[in-house]
Amino acid sequence: MQEQENKQRQLELVKKAKAGDMLAFEDLIVQYEKMIYNVALRMMNHSEDAYDMAQEVFIKAYRYLDKFDERSAFSTWLYRIAVNTCIDEMRKRKGKQTQSLDNELQNEDGSWKQEIADPDATPEEAVLQKEEQSEIMQALDTLSEEHKTIVVLRDIRGLSYEEIAEITETSLGTVKSRLSRGRKQLQQEILKIWEQNGKTYVINKERRGRT
């Protein structure tokens, strides 16, 4: 019931915004600004760039609001704009930035993660952990825009295959194929970087129920 009420309120805000109500549009921005910023951060790997991309996303959303099909979820439409905006910028910059990434990602067997994360780490250990997170993001940047998008939306944002297919305007089969290839390449690149840096890590596979 609460979810249905939220959807109805969102639809009302969209209709008001389409009619020129800036307060309604600002209300929508407040609801989704964190979500869009987080997507941009994972795609662009740099906080200032992510902020700029998020601003661009909402500018485009306002500009093309009249083209939004109200039968679709507004969040899905925003995700699509965010992903396309970031991909366009990434292609211009060739993805040279780095930024921290959560230590845990997914592979076909469930999840795998670095075995060194410690909330009680010493300052020296904390520095090492930050370096290792940067290495993971470095590996993520080796993926193509299409594969990186799927990995970010699925393994970091936790969206369903159906949502990702709608956002990227591709089939479920394409989403699953790109995700599988992206995960495999990401794991290989991370292990390659760790090997080059003379570090040893353990892959910990745990079935998490995500398919």
Image (cartoon, rainbow, N blue to C red):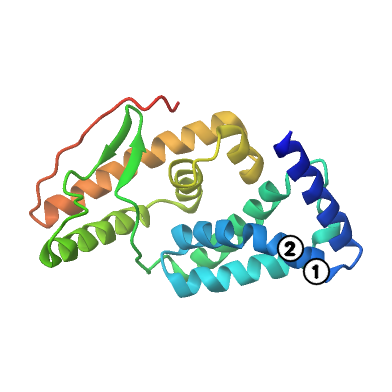
Front in this rendered view, residue 22 or 36: 22
Above or below 137: residue 181: above
Q: Amino acid at mark 1?
A: Leu
Please tell me whether mark 1 sits on a helix, a strand or a loop.
Answer: helix
Residue drawn at x 66%, y 63% is: 30
The residue positioned farthest toward the right in the image shown:
19
Residue at 72% across / 66% down in the picture? 60
Give yes or no for contact between labels 2 and 1 (Cβ–Cβ under 8 Å).
yes
Q: Where does the image place residue 124, in percent across and percent down from the top left? A: 11, 66
Element type where label 2 sits in the image: helix
* Circle 2 residue: 27
27 or 103, which lies in front? Answer: 27
Label placed on residue 23: 1
Query: What amino acid type should be assigned to the residue bearing mark 2?
Result: Asp
Residue 47 lies, with reference to residue 133, above or below; the image says below
Count of numbered marks: 2
* Residue 159 position in % (x across, y down): 54, 40
